Amino acid sequence: MGLGRRDGLERHLRPYRNGRDLTGRSRGAWVLDFYGMTAPMVRERFPEAYQHLIEQVKELRDPQGRLVGRDANARAVYREFWWIFGEPRAQFRPALKGLKRYIVTVETAKHRLFQFLDADVIADNMLVCVADDDAATLAVLSSRVHTAWCAASGGSLEDRPRYTKSRCFDPFPFPPLTHDQRAGLREAGEALDAHRRAVLAENPDITLTALYNVLERVRTGAPLGPAEEAVKQRGLVLILRDLHRDIDELTLQAYGWPSATPDAVIVQTLARLNRRRRTEEAKGDVAWLRPDYQRGRATEPAPVAQLLPLGPRPDAAPSLRIFPKPPYERPLAVQAALGEAASPQQTSDLARRFKGGRRNERRIDQALVILHRYGHVHRLEDGRWSPR
């Protein structure tokens, strides 16, 4: 492809990572990336690489001779920019300027893990990327607070939670941090990142998924088999548990919440904080994550905290929610609907907030009973329900 003969081609060879590289073991894959160049520029400067991309990317055919390359892709951006690896991330790539690393998470995964990638690594389109190199941000995203939020606002694929950036990250109201709080979270985030990297480097047969499978069983007190016990010992899983405990405690302190705050209360309080942030942003008071970068690019306040999918815009007619199919998701959905109401609600009132209306009343009643059992809602004498 001209490597070693075409000056500058090596700068367009980039390491590439996908979800399996992160949760399992990296394959050490590399890709050609000509982001920022036009097709004629690539053809003129790197003709061998250009021909390789025409054959293996643009006009690729399967063994039966059917066109399966970019020319057959249904998405216009893939067809039109066939020489650029993946989909051009016109906003994300400039945001990496000046950063040595950025944060990623696998879009669909059993465990919601956030980690750093070096800035020169190309991320697969199924990785959700955050252009921030601050370990304090990594810590907050790795906390129980954000995990609870994701469980309530994200979707799922089969039995694996799905992290949709527009629902899980964009509306998430990060805590306002003092200098000391940011320093503490940053130290905790760096410690988590360093611990996991060290464990994986010293144990080539252990993966992040294996570590967190065992951590989950340790947290619940479930018995470990011999292989799991080996991962626990060699992977220093008890230290991993303690590092996450420290992050949870520091994050809850940053919000000003008690350590034992239940997940359902966390989600409900975050929803209220989200609505308050939106009001502040409408007035131009934006809680930027990277103020130096974001303020310089903003011609008008671009909200960090978008509308939480769990509720409507203030003073706007609420759109109908989709009533969750999985029974375990229903209490949170009902609790969120009740929390956004201006007054106590009958079951029939809540049913009107969901698509399907009265057909959902029996399931809503069941969810309310569960919420009442755990102290999250209160039933008035007239039969209406209100949040505690």
Image (cartoon, rainbow, N blue to C red):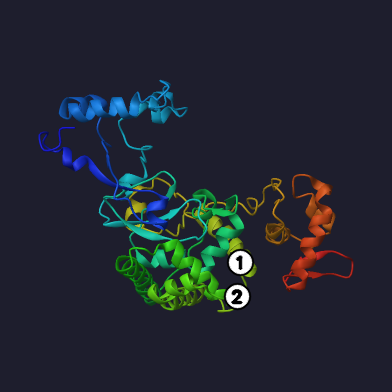
Judged by depth in the image, the label closer to the viewer, 2 or 1, is: 2
Q: What kind of element bears circle 1? A: helix
**In this view, 36 is above or below 193:** above
Q: Residues within 10 Å of mark 1 (few under 14, many from 20)?
A: few
- Residue 205 location, x and y as percent? 36, 63
**In this view, 174 is above or below 258:** above
* Residue 62 figure quarter: top left
Tag 2–tag 1 contact (CB < 8 Å): yes
Q: Is residue 60 left or right of residue 269?
A: left
In front of the other: 340 or 17: 17
Residue pointed to by mark 2: 261
In the rendered image, is residue 270 in sight? yes
- Residue 234 location, x and y as percent? 38, 74
Q: Is tag 2's residue or tag 1's residue first in the polypeptide sequence? A: 2
- The amino acid marked with disc number 1 is Thr
Q: Which mark is residue 234?
A: none
**In the rendered view of the protein, which quadrant contains the C terminus?**
bottom right
Residue pointed to by mark 1: 269
In the rendered image, is residue 130 in sight? no
